[in-house]
Amino acid sequence: VTRRKRRIRVVVPVVTQELANAEEMARAAGPDTDLSVVLIESGPASIETFFDEAIAAPDTIRRIVEAEHDGVDAVVIDCMGDPGMEGAREMVQIPVVGPGQASMNLAAMLGHRFSVVSILDQRVVAQFERQARVYGVWEKLASVRWVEVAVLDLGVDRADLTKRLVAESTAAIERDGAHVIVFGCTGMYGYADAVRAGLHAIGHGDVPVIDPFPAAVRLAETLVDLRLSPSKRSYPLPPVKEIRGFPLYPTRTSVG
Amino acid sequence: VTRRKRRIRVVVPVVTQELANAEEMARAAGPDTDLSVVLIESGPASIETFFDEAIAAPDTIRRIVEAEHDGVDAVVIDCMGDPGMEGAREMVQIPVVGPGQASMNLAAMLGHRFSVVSILDQRVVAQFERQARVYGVWEKLASVRWVEVAVLDLGVDRADLTKRLVAESTAAIERDGAHVIVFGCTGMYGYADAVRAGLHAIGHGDVPVIDPFPAAVRLAETLVDLRLSPSKRSYPLPPVKEIRGFPLYPTRTSVG
Amino acid sequence: VTRRKRRIRVVVPVVTQELANAEEMARAAGPDTDLSVVLIESGPASIETFFDEAIAAPDTIRRIVEAEHDGVDAVVIDCMGDPGMEGAREMVQIPVVGPGQASMNLAAMLGHRFSVVSILDQRVVAQFERQARVYGVWEKLASVRWVEVAVLDLGVDRADLTKRLVAESTAAIERDGAHVIVFGCTGMYGYADAVRAGLHAIGHGDVPVIDPFPAAVRLAETLVDLRLSPSKRSYPLPPVKEIRGFPLYPTRTSVG
Amino acid sequence: VTRRKRRIRVVVPVVTQELANAEEMARAAGPDTDLSVVLIESGPASIETFFDEAIAAPDTIRRIVEAEHDGVDAVVIDCMGDPGMEGAREMVQIPVVGPGQASMNLAAMLGHRFSVVSILDQRVVAQFERQARVYGVWEKLASVRWVEVAVLDLGVDRADLTKRLVAESTAAIERDGAHVIVFGCTGMYGYADAVRAGLHAIGHGDVPVIDPFPAAVRLAETLVDLRLSPSKRSYPLPPVKEIRGFPLYPTRTSVG
Amino acid sequence: VTRRKRRIRVVVPVVTQELANAEEMARAAGPDTDLSVVLIESGPASIETFFDEAIAAPDTIRRIVEAEHDGVDAVVIDCMGDPGMEGAREMVQIPVVGPGQASMNLAAMLGHRFSVVSILDQRVVAQFERQARVYGVWEKLASVRWVEVAVLDLGVDRADLTKRLVAESTAAIERDGAHVIVFGCTGMYGYADAVRAGLHAIGHGDVPVIDPFPAAVRLAETLVDLRLSPSKRSYPLPPVKEIRGFPLYPTRTSVG
Amino acid sequence: VTRRKRRIRVVVPVVTQELANAEEMARAAGPDTDLSVVLIESGPASIETFFDEAIAAPDTIRRIVEAEHDGVDAVVIDCMGDPGMEGAREMVQIPVVGPGQASMNLAAMLGHRFSVVSILDQRVVAQFERQARVYGVWEKLASVRWVEVAVLDLGVDRADLTKRLVAESTAAIERDGAHVIVFGCTGMYGYADAVRAGLHAIGHGDVPVIDPFPAAVRLAETLVDLRLSPSKRSYPLPPVKEIRGFPLYPTRTSVG
């Protein structure tokens, strides 16, 4: 029996081509998955603020509707802020997975408390605490920390970033009571092994480090295999109505 | 001494001119306030879903940035979903007020528990419960109910809508333990007196009914008078970066 | 058209005349408000403890019942502990506003988390955490701090008090994650500008500082304008019964 | 060895002699306890509202300070609202126990969820939910119900009251998921056996029924025996200051 | 490149051979997984009570330690109560997954609220609410319902069980606000399709139905693939000490 | 009248005779109580981990069933982890009390927040936070701290243990905001006086210190006197079914 490969579409909700390395991303999927990657065309260079999320969401949703039209089995939004996830879940029937929700829920299952170690500055605290509340994992969140690096600078100095991630993870463990670490940006994809090694070297090898992008891809695969999708009772199809200024949206009647 | 009037801008986050009666809206403001009203140009005809909010937010934020450029003192977003509120608070220094937050917090101060009575169908439950969690008033929310009327049909039959609002408010009081009622749509603006009368007639005159739009306008006035604005520590100015597809945004350097 | 001015009565729930500067208080009201001020006759010199609140409450309620008899439109209790607020809301139909509830709810709307910076010593922590729970803003409270000054010494050395308020606000911001500061005593009325300036000088100009007394007065004005009052379902009129030892209370039959 | 009997003082926070049957109350204590009973002299005939609690608290605290002067080992306040408990705990060193706190905490230990079945009408819901929040047992509270009987009518028709208590307890069990019942008024003292019998007769003998007054007396005895008292860090001695209108209070210097 | 198949061991924590159909269980795994199944030798015939869990846990943990010795990559405990999961996570390094945690967390990601539809009678309410609290998904739990069938009778009448599952799921959706259904017993494995069909037929096709056993197997596969294991900071290896009465446990020194 | 003495059985859920000093334990009971003590025969030398609890629970439950057969009035499990408590409450009708639940609830009544000071290392944090959640006292828990001493070493150096308990209690008070201290191990029985003295010497005499074992014994006495037992609706009698490997259990039919 030949089993058809799962088709998963990654929607990168920014306009920066450098943030979407399809080959590297494909390694996050299982052997039975074809992973395709698209960027959005309208939106920010990177997602760091509520404003960035707001202007990324409409074209992200358009790309997800397009993905369903293309016949893919599930979509992963490549950003911890999960921009557009809820609106997209209303517009399509296939699973739409966000790494923020996927990785924080996974962390909640692996230990007593988890911390998020993210980009930039203190502004990320409110962002992740807000997500933790909405996703219902608030009581499992030990703290949110940051490495003082902007998204677009994440790849500049790998050794430096690793060092900062280890330092903040250590502070999360020793001061905030974290038992699990979750990276707060999918731009940190690929750093988990180095951070685990760094933590191990200073006696914190007992703490799992979750790389959110692969966690989201695996959740998408699981949903496809189990034939599960987000509840259409939580995310019912929007009623048909006039929309101005978004000519690229497929007409709603073809969706419903 | 002549006191300059407060200037408050209402941003109506839909493209439907009929939903923005400037004259009627002006009655919600105090005598020392000049109220101006604008609609967005890109977005949905009405806001009923997460998708609607997502496509309304970018142009709503643009209108709010524009309002600050115009020298207004505060902005009110005319929708219970408060679309774009957090992104806009990042982009400007003036107060940005949403009727969802303003009315639910006011309700929390007036009684033990409040219920939201909203438009449409059961989909609004998740929307308002999500807001209540994010706004921190979760423990005060008794229930969310709906009247089975779409936003664009709200003005069609005033007597019928009043009857439905009274019926659902009564159910909220008698079955869910509500002590305060909040309308779940700013399109219900002006119905509070009739609903209070209806409730009084059946022995529930002891329950306040909050009309969210005036509540938001008064909060905006209060913030202007007290020279308070949302915390820029919660909503710091976004970093300057490339944005594609939103030519109408003022350049960020003129904002910062 | 002449609009009748709102009449608001401030009840100062202590017996210390120096704590009730009517002229200064009047500046907290809008131009359309007549503000009158009364003290209680039985009670403590200042309110710092649960005991102080207990002995202040009965005469505070009496003064509020009296205010309604005098035809005022709303009452503000001039103390962050809101002594007697719930009992008074049962006894009258007009809005009774406490600065504790008004300022903490306002803070909850302006940012992700707020801290209270109060008088005296660690005893205030339990007091404000208790209020935050009862008022339903618990999840928004970052911390409670204190300046080691008794209420009656608040006006003695303005520069010193400002310095202490800035120092504790800074600790709240940097160590506790506060995004908004609320003064924990109405005796700190008038210090907000100086504290904002002090915070600005050390790089925390992004944090709003809420002066609770003006916040309460503005809320009272808003409720009068919107014709809203606390829910009589939460605060029903008490049944008539024998009361001993409180001869100054108006007979209940004239209230009911 | 002769062991000195514990001396426990019951303070009945009302002025109605009929509500304080010392002989019947003594049966709630263990054999090694001398129970004395006093009423207050200033306050309401019964406690049913926040207003009643406010006017009962000052003289209740006075009676508790007096009890400590008399050398008793612990005090029980004879009312589910625990009026004056926190202020009294500040003023004295001996244990001050309220049946509201004692019985709700006991219920929380005996089963998954408990309901309070109280006097009067729906107003008691907010009162007990407020207490459950302050006492930290909120998550264990299934519901609050009431029997439509005023406090002063509780003893009029025992059979009728029993029937009502069984009916509301049954509703709490079957509709609200209660696993334990707590009476919501110490005026229901002595009804537990009859209510248990009534519940047993209809198949709910598996549900414990807690009579709050004996539960409070036993907690007071336990605290005396274990030499424990409420934390003076939560309830520090109030600072000495001027108090007007409460001539009966012992001077504070004799307390400190 | 040949990829070694994952080896996953299912530990069935009961002594009833009929509850462990290895062939059927294998269908829950992906093509790259070898699934082996063992029962325990000391314990109950089925797990329905806290007592059952207590006597099932020791031998379940022994089987999991044995599985690690056998070189398997991960273990799934085949019971919604997740008996022994926490103790086993202390004793081994490999992932130990429970269907209770796996399915409730999955449900929390798929919709606003979920309900558990379980076996037996009302006793399951406390069991699942307890798990929801410990797992941190409490705020996502709409309700717990039951079908009045004992575990050992689950397979007796498939049509009847399906009908009961549809009926209780419908009640959960319509009365309790559930947006996702989770079966409350792994003995319901294989019923999801029929229940989905039943729900679809009455207009509730918008509600996902989660079969917990496959959900747990997929989570185990994901953890193996991502090289993640429960936090050893939450579940540190127990210290070596004397144990009596459990001769079958491998000596601890060979584990440490 | 001769009053029969209460008969209370202490079940020590370990196999280490040294941990069960019956004479010392008897001092925790009142004069009207006969206290008997038994150890378990199968289980660990001490309880420090989830694994220890899992292997202690079955024989603990057996001892409790046996105690009921022996006619005792109530049982106390001598371990803060309360191993087997829930399963035992299902199997018997008499009160089963755990010092974890008894002492944490008592602490919740005595002050605003409490901290647990326990044995060993950071692993106890997750254990006690889990218990606090299940017991519903989560919001009262300030922190969990530990003294870096194993259970079996607790009696080795009394002065050293006292010093460590004072040091960690002080940290809990000064850094974590604790107002009450609860020992986190019944092996600390008898240290409360010395720790209180140590805290008093450094200015923290205002903080009660709760010794969990006597607190549990007193709660058991109270339940016997009030004729209360844990709810059989929360803990219904388990259905009769096959059990393998536990020959020492009395047959279930003699229990039901």
Image (cartoon, coloured by chain):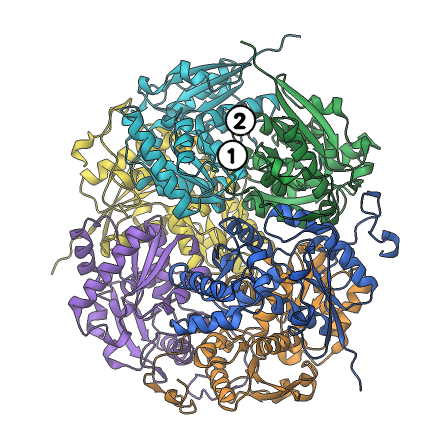
Chain colours: A orange, B purple, C yellow, D cyan, E blue, F green
Residue kind at label 1, given as amino acid type: Leu
Q: What residue is at 41 percent from the left and 62 percent from the top? A: E177
Q: Find out whether the residues at labels 1 and 2 contact each other: C-beta distance under 8 Å.
A: yes
Residue kind at label 2, given as amino acid type: Leu
Number of marks in the rendered image: 2
Residue lying farthest to the right in this orientation: E253
Chain under disc 1: D
Q: Is residue B249 left or right of residue C164?
A: left
Label ID, residue B177:
none
Question: Which element carries disc 2, helix, strand or loop?
Answer: helix
Q: Earlier in the sequence, mark 1 or mark 2?
A: 1
Question: Which element carries disc 1, helix, strand or loop?
Answer: helix
* Residue D38 in the image, given as x and y percentages of width and height: 40, 16
Q: Residues within 10 Å of mark 1 (few under 14, many from 20)?
A: many
Q: Nearer the viewer, mark 1 or mark 2?
A: 1
* Residue B150 in the image, given as x and y percentages of width and height: 28, 74
Chain under disc 2: D
Query: In the rendered image, which residue does mark 2 sit on?
Result: D219
Residue lying farthest to the front in this orientation: E156
Q: What residue is at 76 percent from the left and 64 percent from the top? A: E94
* Residue F85 in the image, given as x and y percentages of width and height: 63, 40
Judge whether residue D250 can be spotted in this image: no
Q: CA distance from mark 1 to mark 2?
A: 10 Å
Q: What residue is at 59 percent from the left and 70 percent from the top? A: A102
Q: Are marks 1 and 2 on the same chain?
A: yes
Q: Is residue A21 left or right of residue B26?
A: right
The foreground one among A233 and C4 is A233
Which quadrant of the figure contains the C terminus of chain C? top left
The foreground one among E195 and F3 is E195
Query: In the rendered image, which residue does mark 1 sit on?
Result: D106
